[in-house]
Image: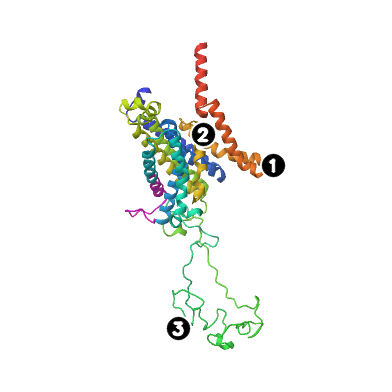
Amino acid sequence: MQNLLRLPGARLVTHAVLVLAIWRVAMLVTDAVDPLTDYYIALVAMYATAMFGMVILVGLSGQVSLGNGALMAIGGYVFAVTTLNWQTVPFTSFPMNGTWAIVFAAIGGVVAGLLIGILGARLRGPYLAGLTLGIAVGIPAIANRFPDLLGGETGLELTVPYPDGGYAPVDDTGTTDEPVDVLPTAQAGASGDATPAPGDELTLDTFPTEQAALPTGQPPLASSGTGTGDELTLDTFPTAQPSGGTGDELTLDTFPTATPEPVASPDLSSAPIDGGTDALAGVDVGFVLERWQAGLAVAVACIVGFVALNLVRGRQGQVWRAVRDDPVAAAVSGISPSTSKVSAFVVSSLFAAVAGAVFAQILAYVGPGAFGLGLSLSLLVGIVLGGRGSLVGALLGAVLLVWLPEFVLQLAGDRGWPEQVTNNAPNLIYGLLVVLVVLVAPGGIVGGIQAGYARLRGRAGRSG
């Protein structure tokens, strides 16, 4: 078995099998649970994607970052701008969809990580923390400077691009929510220069006042005592109803109405999901949005986890550890500390931008409030709690970030805590947990488990 693992490419195959097994189990879980649980699974996978980059940047490279939430904002905004403004992929004829938008978000993350890494390569400790803190505060605020493109303070609402390009929201009558630009103005029997032509904009000045016949078979307005341009009043409004004549009082009961013919709603029971311009043709009434979001987030997390696993256990991971432990010794051995730090920033920013694109699809919204300083601090807290040097620790930290607030809300509801206490309790618990972990298990949950297992093995070896 050990000889097989030494073969070229054996590590990649092993990691691929492991990640595929995790993905398959996660898919079975998402199919078996309710939509709310699927939503939580999507959030866990999204946080894990971002914190895989934190493991590389903080755990392996030894740098401090308080700005990964802002890097997620870059990915989310690139995702939103591309899906809202590009119908096709630039320089190609492929239709724009969620997959392409995530690719562009990843490119934006690489560019941002390269710039930030070059700026922070010569900084250490509190100076680097100050730089990333400024990035966490400044980048989301850029949206306020470009409200036309980025939506300003209110952000941008998204129509989630479903797998094959997406479809527009459909109401109960089977019509889309797209606004009608111009109201049809062709009137039967309308005459005169003031009458708009078909396709012209209908206004109060151009509304035709001479009708050949009203929808209910009414005579022309002139026959009821009004000429062209005369004021229409209740006394002169034609009300030829079975129970009244001209001059009768106009009420809701006597108002002439034309009952439209019922329009049959399309049968969507067997319609497959199909994107493109004909949006309504592809609606699947059995489609569960939260399940699809969970599947997307888990798939992205597995792909990112596969890349991170090979980087951590490969030569690049050894380079990051060498620079973290002793930059001088690494430089003597031919490793460039600056290049190593920049590469860690690029990889971390790439993962954060992809997580931001997934976050935008989960929320169907991007805005400064969704990517504030609190998100960056949450990512740092999660990686400290789970274990900053372990990908499994990143996954455990993601579970804590999603589960702890819900646990506090449930506990507050059972005990009747005030709303102010309920809203601030998760932050208090996060702070206490961080202090506890730093004092008791500096390596986080995973580090504490590994240290405990090592002590048990040492005691067993001495006793044997």
Residue at mark 3 to residue at mark 2: CA–CA distance = 74 Å
Callout 3 environment at 10 Å: few (<14), some (14 to 19), or many (20+)? few
Residue at the spot of label 3: 193
Residue at the spot of label 1: 416
Q: Are marks 1 and 2 in contact (CB under 8 Å)?
A: no
| Quadrant in the rendering for residue 222 | bottom right
173 relative to 240, above or below: above
Q: Which mark is residue 282?
A: none
Q: Is residue 459 left or right of residue 312?
A: right
In reply to whether residue 221 is colored magenta, the answer given is no
Q: Earlier in the sequence, mark 3 or mark 1?
A: 3
Q: Point out the frontmost of discs 1 and 2.
A: 1
Residue nearest the observer in this picture, 108 or 201: 108
| Quadrant in the rendering for residue 121 | top left
The stretch in magenta equals 86-106
Q: Earlier in the sequence, mark 1 or mark 2?
A: 2
Residue 198 appears in the picture as rendered: yes
Name the residue located 54 percent from the left edge and 63 percent from the top edge: 173
Q: Are marks 3 and 2 in contact (CB under 8 Å)?
A: no
The percent position of residue 367, horizontal first and vertical second, equals 49, 50
Residue at mark 1 to residue at mark 2: CA–CA distance = 29 Å
**Three-letter amino acid code at disc 2?**
Leu
- Residue at the outermost right position: 416
The percent position of residue 290, horizontal first and vertical second, equals 52, 47
Badge 3 marks a residue whose secondary structure is loop
The percent position of residue 421, horizontal first and vertical second, equals 64, 41
Badge 2 marks a residue whose secondary structure is helix
The percent position of residue 409, horizontal first and vertical second, equals 62, 41
Q: Which mark is residue 396?
A: 2
Number of numbered callouts drawn: 3
